Image (cartoon, rainbow, N blue to C red):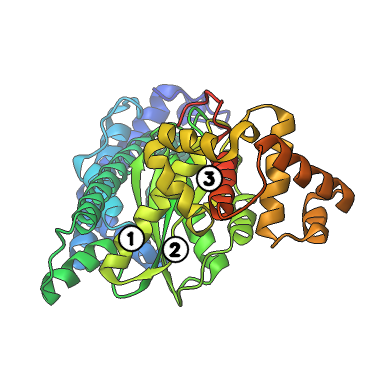
């Protein structure tokens, strides 16, 4: 219960106003306002709808706002009249229902909080006017008590209605996510409706058009980073997908759906079928928290392209995780497509790598340097200068390492050049054939 020190101003009969006098005056003010609570509530509702744009809503929302305000006014007057603890009362059911409805309509929670502050101020104007009209000796102390009681009540109820708002928003979010995931699964499994009207309904649910050229992404974070499964992680994935889309010049907002606590699937509507830039995507990730990764498919059009680019993004992620170490920030399917196919049988792939490279596939650091030099040498068309520049070593070093790689392998390049290039690429992503790293 709110306690107020006795007022120092003169009271009836010349004595200081005591707590009983103040409580009695407050009760009389509340009793006087009681018959006018409908007028008070309507006045507050009008002020809220006028001053807070987000609360203007449809007629049903306006009616529920009125019920919420009336419930709160009635409860506050009851607390004042009977000298109750404002933190011991239950929030009015209409106030809780209104907060939930605002969440359903995606009205910002700040609008709800501001409504209580504005309503509190307006209600106190009514109370002050009544206290002043009565002109009692303890009017000032009564007004002070009303201020403290109303502030405590508003603080107490605001906590409850904001909690109800957040819980309802989370229920709605999970429901929408579940529906969107179900629709996406239908499309990926080939169960999407083919009739124009049905297809339009699916697109409306997803907020995404299938007629576009799509770029599939898998966005994930390192497990155990503390983000948990509370929705905060998904919000991060959404922001990453949106930022990647902006950086790549996407034609609209991405479609993003949660897959699990540590990853999400995304599709960007593209303006053309240009391959995504790994450097651009990496630049986006650098602006976000560490531990985030993106795997990208190749742009493809229509419903079939929606499926294909997603499958490629997932395969690119498999490659990124296959080596067992820290995955790269960005993995692009166009750069690892052949290795992605090998990931379906990692043990078989590594056995094949051993046959092609021989001892050059050993896991020791010396062999790794030789493999990387030979891989870049072949990728640059056999240019010593380009390889030296990329690896930042002298061209004579490149020449020595390439020759040494042939010696370690046991035979020079011949008709198996393409096999060697693929085997070197597989080593770079999957690890050397002697490695015991898990496939991930």
Q: In this image, 350 relative to 376: left or right? A: left
Badge 1 element: helix
Q: For mark 3, what is the residue?
A: 293
Q: Position of residue 32 (x, y in %)?
A: 27, 45
Q: Are marks 2 and 1 in contact (CB under 8 Å)?
A: yes
| Distance of label 2 from label 1 (alpha carbons) | 8 Å
* Label number found at residue 308: 1
Label 3: how many Cα within 10 Å (few below 14, some 14–19, many 20+): many
Q: For mark 2, what is the residue?
A: 298
Up/down of 109 relative to 298, above or below: above
Let me know if residue 114 appears in the view.
Answer: no
Mark 1 or 3: the one toward you: 1
| Distance of label 2 from label 3 (alpha carbons) | 17 Å
Q: Residue at x 32, y 27 (%)?
A: 83
Q: Are marks 2 and 3 in contact (CB under 8 Å)?
A: no
Q: In this image, 356 relative to 1: left or right? A: right
* Towards the viewer: 153 or 168: 168
């Amino acid at each position: 219960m709110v306690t107020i020190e006795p007022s120092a101003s003169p009271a009836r009969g010349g004595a200081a106003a005591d707590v009983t006098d103040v409580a009695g005056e407050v009760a009389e003010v509340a009793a006087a306002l009681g018959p006018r609570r409908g007028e008070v509530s309507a006045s507050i509702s009008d002020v809220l709808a006028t001053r807070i744009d987000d609360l203007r809503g449809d007629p049903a929302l306006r009616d529920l706002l009125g019920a919420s305000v009336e419930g709160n006014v009635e409860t506050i007057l009851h607390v004042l009249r009977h000298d109750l603890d404002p933190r011991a009362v239950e929030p009015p059911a209409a106030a809780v229902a209104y907060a939930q409805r605002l969440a359903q309509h995606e009205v910002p929670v700040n609008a709800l909080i501001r409504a209580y502050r504005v309503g509190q101020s307006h209600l106190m104007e009514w109370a002050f006017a009544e206290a002043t009209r009565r002109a009692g000796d303890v009017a000032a102390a009564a007004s002070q008590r009303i201020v403290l009681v109303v502030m405590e009540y508003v603080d107490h109820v605001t906590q409850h209605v904001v909690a109800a708002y957040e819980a309802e928003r989370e229920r709605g979010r999970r429901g929408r996510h579940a529906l969107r995931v179900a629709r996406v699964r239908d499309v990926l499994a080939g169960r999407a409706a083919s009739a124009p009207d049905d297809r339009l309904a699916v697109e409306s649910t997803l907020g995404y058009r299938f007629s576009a050229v799509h770029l599939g992404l898998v966005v994930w974070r390192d497990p155990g980073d503390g983000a948990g499964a509370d929705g905060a992680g998904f919000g991060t994935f959404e922001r990453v997908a949106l930022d990647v889309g902006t950086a790549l010049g996407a034609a609209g907002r991405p479609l993003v759906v949660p897959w699990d606590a540590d990853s999400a699937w995304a599709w960007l509507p593209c303006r053309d079928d240009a391959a995504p830039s790994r450097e651009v995507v990496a630049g986006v990730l650098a602006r976000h928290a560490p531990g985030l990764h993106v795997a990208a498919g190749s742009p493809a059009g229509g419903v079939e392209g929606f499926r294909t680019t997603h499958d490629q993004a997932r395969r690119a992620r498999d490659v990124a995780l296959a080596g067992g170490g820290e995955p790269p920030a960005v993995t692009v399917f166009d750069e690892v497509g052949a290795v992605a196919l090998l990931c379906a049988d990692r043990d078989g792939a590594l056995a094949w790598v051993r046959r092609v490279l021989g001892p050059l596939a050993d896991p020791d650091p010396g062999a790794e340097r030789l493999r990387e030099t030979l891989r870049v040498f072949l990728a640059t068309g056999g240019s010593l200068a380009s390889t030296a520049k990329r690896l930042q070593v002298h061209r004579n070093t490149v020449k020595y390492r390439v020759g040494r790689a042939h010696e370690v392998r046991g035979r020079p390049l011949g008709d198996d050049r393409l096999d060697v290039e693929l085997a070197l690429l597989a080593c770079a992503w999957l690890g050397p054939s002697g490695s015991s790293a898990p496939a991930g």
